[in-house]
Image (tube, helix red, strand yellow):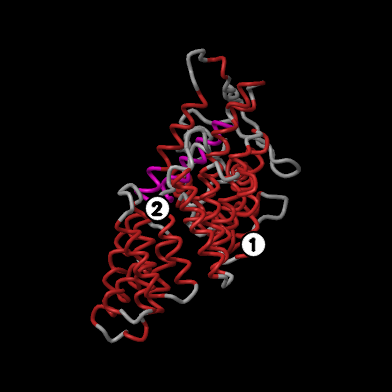
Amino acid sequence: MPGIDGWTLREWRRGRGWDVPQLARQLRHVSKEPVAAHDGLVRMIRSWERGTHALSERYELLYRSLGLGRAGGPDSPAGTPAAALADAVTVSSAAPPLPRLRLGDDPDARPAERFLLARRALRDNDNLFGPRDVIPLAMRQLALLRELSRTSRGGDRRELLLPQVQFADLLGWLYQDCREFDTARHWLDRALEWAHMLDDQACVAFVLARKSQLACDTRDPDTAIAAADAAMRIAGERELVGAVAATYAAHGYALSGDAATAERLYDEARAMLGTTDATGTVPWVTFLDDAYIDVYRAGSLAALGQHAAAAAGFRAAISGLRPVFHRDRGVYLAREARARASAGEHDHAAELAMRALAIGMETRSARVFAELADVRDATAPASDSPAVSGFRAALTATAAS
């Protein structure tokens, strides 16, 4: 039963009287197969308890072998049946198995629609509050969705594939914002696999575009360009997802130093945005607008060393940003601050960075703090300025808290 929340894991550990290193030693002791090294396992336990990573099935079984979920445990007052870890740990329980979810159990239910609504709600919560609290909820919803899919057949099972693609893409994005890039890549790979099963070319194109975006964030222009080109070939010019892919391709070319191709692709993205009918396109390309393209173009200008133009571009994009994109406003403010610092406007950069820091503290977005670390470096030549020193001290204090 994947999706155990971090609070449950932490309170169960504390109830046993163990600190995190002691629990790591217990998990290593009961496993007869290799597990993470002690220090790595300590970090994993802390990430599970914070909710930044979901407990994997294998480690859940190890937890259960130590008593998690037995009678009196914090996650199940009546006890939870434990399972067996193949060739490793076997735990028996007399408790009856949980009932399996089936579409036919509620003839009036519309599960695919409900999961799509849940995904939209979680996406909006991420935009407003950041990914840390959303990840456990998304993991739990996907686990329920997968269980329902396993007991469905034919058209019912196929109908559940679209929300599976959407949830995998959402998890890819949440981990991307946490700068957990390997985990983000894993979930985008799952999204691509399920999009192919769905046999929906628009979905396939969108996930490829998202893989391009992730490659841009990891400063891998070759992969960014290749994935975006594939997405554009599949989508064609009539699909709005083609404009998304062109935007990421443009930034990939800018990262590679090709300013002319980047500018041409931004023009193409704007043209597609203005002429494409979004009806029937990939159902989650609602974020794309002129401000979104503006902010990517500004980032490209910064990558090309045109810092004053980049700062102006970020300012224009932020002024047109929809209020729902609260966390992203923090990211873009930090990027504008870095551009202004690189252009010599250190005090202005510090003022913008303080605004971004407030949003970063509220949303706990690793993307915001990564950008602010770059602002700190860019403002180093003016570290004696009261505004700059105040920002740098606030960032240091936040990191230490």
Residue 142 belongs to the span the image colors magenta? yes
Mark 1 or 2: the one toward you: 2
Indicate the position of residue 177 as horizontal and vertical percent values: 47, 56
Residue 109 belongs to the span the image colors magenta? no
Look at label 1 and name its amino acid.
Ala
Residue that carries the numbered disc 2 in the rendered image? 290
Stretch in magenta: 124-146
Query: In the image, what residue occupies the spot 28% across and 64% down?
Result: 355
233 left or right of 240 in image: right
Quarter of the image with the C terminus in it:
bottom left
Q: Main secondary structure of the magenta part?
A: helix
Mark 2 secondary-structure assignment? helix
Quarter of the image with the N terminus in it:
top right
In terms of depth relative to the viewer, which is nearer, 227 or 393?
227
Residue that carries the numbered disc 1 in the rendered image? 37
Mark 2 residue crowding within 10 angstroms, few (<14) / some (14–19) / many (20+):
some
Q: Which image quadrant for residue 364? A: bottom left
Query: In the image, what residue occupies the spot 50% across and 64% down?
Result: 263
**View extreme (left): residue:** 386
In terms of depth relative to the viewer, which is nearer, 114 or 69?
114
Look at label 2 and name its amino acid.
Asp
337 left or right of 244 in image: left
Indicate the position of residue 109 as horizontal and vertical percent values: 48, 18
Q: Which image quadrant for residue 318? A: bottom left
Query: In the image, what residue occupies the spot 43% across and 45% down?
Result: 134
Give the alpha-carbon distance from disc 1 to disc 2, as whole Å: 47 Å
Indicate the position of residue 108 as horizontal and vertical percent values: 48, 14
